Image (cartoon, coloured by chain):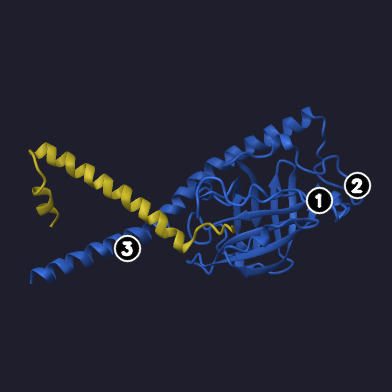
Amino acid sequence: MVKRLFRSLPGPLPLRILLAIVIVLLILVALGFIFERAGDLLDNGGVIQ
Amino acid sequence: MKILRGLGWTMIWSGVIILLFLGYQLVGTNVITARAQSVASEELEQTFEEAAEILELSGIDVPDTIEPGEMPDVPVLSPDITPVENQAFARLVIPKAEADDVVFEGVSRSTLKNGPGHMPWTALPGQPGNAVISGHRTTYGAPFFDLDLLEPGDEIRVQTALGWHVYEVRSSEIVSPTDVWVTDHRDGAWLTLTTCHPRWSAAQRLVVFAELVEGVNYPFVQSMDPTAPNVTDRPDSLPGEDF
């Protein structure tokens, strides 16, 4: 599946590698943000306000 | 067949994402806090040294110990050494919960990643009034993981630039996250610790109330007029990040 997604990227191989790295980084940033917000449901630091 | 395969891949990736999430919460956040605490310990030593210099320049003598009946020169922490947002300014030790953490000023999301945070609009630890400190229960080093073990009479120690302040637990309570009355001013000198309850849920708050029983300010607190006006005012909302 990952291979198929990689092959479906446009352009020559170097560009596809670059695109893949950018996409992976974007996914990681998005996951980090989601993990932070979801983590607040488990433990948000105990602040009272 | 194609639908089943798609469903299979979706479940596999969902599982991977859930595992990554758990890994981040159980391990990643603890690594972040451990690093911050390590740096903060050094920062704290520097803060204490700077505070000692300020007190020395001010001609204020902070005694290491107080004899019974003796009144210290410094009733409250000097305003010159009031901590700024995200500054490490105290060490919190809870022997029964095996907690020993550097405390930071502020309770924003980013500050609490570093360790327990002091609510800026409340009294500072060791001062008359109600000093409120919040901390994570299960993630980011889980400084207050075992806060539920505390019982009346248990000891909590806080080290500030003035020295050690010893508190004794009086009570604990489960409240709603919006029960701001727990941060209200109290006569005497109190330390209020707040954290999430139950473990792995932010639905409620576990609050522990402790009263100052020993330290450089203790004789002063004992002699205070209980009708004295409040030290601080609570803002309607926290500056910066929301929760």
Which amino acid does the dot numbered 3 rest on? Ile
**How packed is label 1: few (under 14 Cα within 10 Å), some, or many (20 or more)?**
few
Q: Is B216 or B237 nearer to us in this picture?
A: B237
> Which chain is tinted blue?
B
B202 on left or right of B13: right
- For disc 2, the neighbor class at 10 Å (few under 14, some 14 to 19, many from 20) is few
Determine the CA span between mark 2 and mark 3. Answer: 59 Å
Label 3: how many residues lie within 10 Å, few (<14), some (14-19) or many (20+)?
few
Indicate the chain coloured yellow by its letter. A
Residue at the spot x=70%, y=49% of the render?
Answer: B233
Q: Chain of mark 1?
A: B
**Label 1 vs 2, first from the N-terminus:** 2
* Residue located beneath label 1 in the image: B229
Front position among marks 2 and 3: 3
Judged from this view, the residue extending furthest toward the top is B57
Of badges 3 and 1, the one in the foreground is 1
In the rendered image, the vertical position of residue A26 relative to residue B56, given as above or below? below
Which residue is disc 2 drawn over?
Answer: B70
Q: Pick the residue in front: A40 or B90.
A: A40
Q: Nearer the viewer, mark 1 or mark 2?
A: 1
Residue under label 3, please give it: B18
> In terms of sequence position, does the residue under pointer 2 or pointer 3 come before the other?
3
Q: Position of residue B119 (x, y in %)?
A: 63, 50
Are labels 2 and 3 on one chain? yes
Q: Quadrant of residue A39?
A: bottom left
**In this image, A17 relative to B50: left or right?**
left
